[in-house]
Amino acid sequence: MLMLALIWNLLTPSPVRADELVLHLIPAPTRTDWRTPRKLALSAIRNELVGHEGLKRHGIGHLYVELNCGQTRILTGATSTGNTEERRALFKEGYGLGVLFKNYQGKLDAPAEVAADLQSNFSSGRSSFIRFLISPAACQRAIHYWIEYQFRGFDRVYAGLNARPLRGESAGCTAFGVSFLEILGLQAPVFEDQWKTRLVVPRKFVGGPLTGKRVRIWKLLFAFSAGWDANPSQGGFGLDFWDPERMDQWIRETSDLLASGGPQPLAWPTTATRIEASPGVEVDARGVPVPNVPFFETDLISNP
């Protein structure tokens, strides 16, 4: 009954469309600066204060998922229920950069809200997108995954940057979006290389349960000479996440390259495209075999 209720309440009727999965990227108002812990803190604060023309701020960037399967259209994205928890952890509870690993109360973006926000960003060119043309069987698998994700309650957690949904850890917005590629066998090596940011966060800047310490925001803002650790052996915490700004940059650069007759970046036919002022890349993945394995690793372990 729960799955039927999810389908009834959350699927958005639409005209018949080609079977496709689209990831829409919206970068932060100004680029997040990951060069040092201090620059990261400053750019995060700046993005909370800078206004822009979109309906939503997306202070750390965002990803929306669009899934069209015949008359079924899903517009969604993983997000937090508000920024109160994040601000309390950073400014009152002394999490420092521990906020990057912390889980918050989550929800999925409402379809009408997604549609309005995307339209605003299409007209301004602030967003970018990658569209995968997929088979009907792949489309149905993606719908089943979306329903199962909610059935297990993963949508109610907006997870830290390291979390991976297929490990049953819920997700942030980009990990949620990329998980659709993973369950459809569309995760290309270039995505792993070009879409991720990897670094090691020094232990001295991490507060909260990971260290049992309190790290005030001023410690980050006055860490003029501090950088990231070279490797986890120094006692820091590895951070490995799908970066919405790197994803957006790759899409824009690849779209320009393809439009000028450049080489194919993927194993599948790929072309440049646009929605109004927003650049995109279209991938013909209709011939990719649909995986026939459980969505979540815990199911693989319990059913070898």
Image (cartoon, helix red, strand yellow):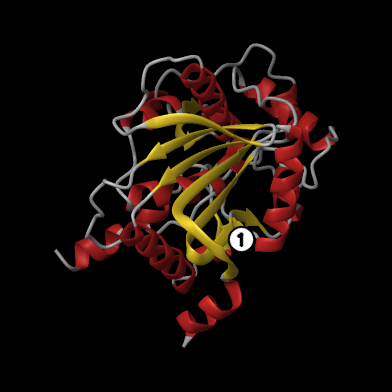
Residue 77 left/right relative to 299: right
Residue at image coords 38%, 25%: 193
Residue at image coords 37%, 40%: 284
Rendered position, 264 above or below 56: above
Q: Which residue ends up furthest to the front in the rendered image?
A: 16
Residue 94 left/right relative to 64: right
**Total labels drawn:** 1
Residue at image coords 83%, 35%: 52
Q: Give SS at disc 1.
A: strand
Q: Nearer the viewer, residue 198 or 122?
A: 122
Q: Quadrant of the C terminus?
A: bottom left
Residue 255 seen in this snapshot: yes
**Percent x, y of residue 81:** 69, 60
Rendered position, 103 above or below 95: below
**Percent x, y of residue 26:** 65, 38
Residue 93 seen in this snapshot: no
For mark 1, what is the residue? 106
Q: Nearer the viewer, residue 145 or 225?
A: 145
Q: Nearer the viewer, residue 126 or 283?
A: 283
**Percent x, y of residue 159:** 54, 52
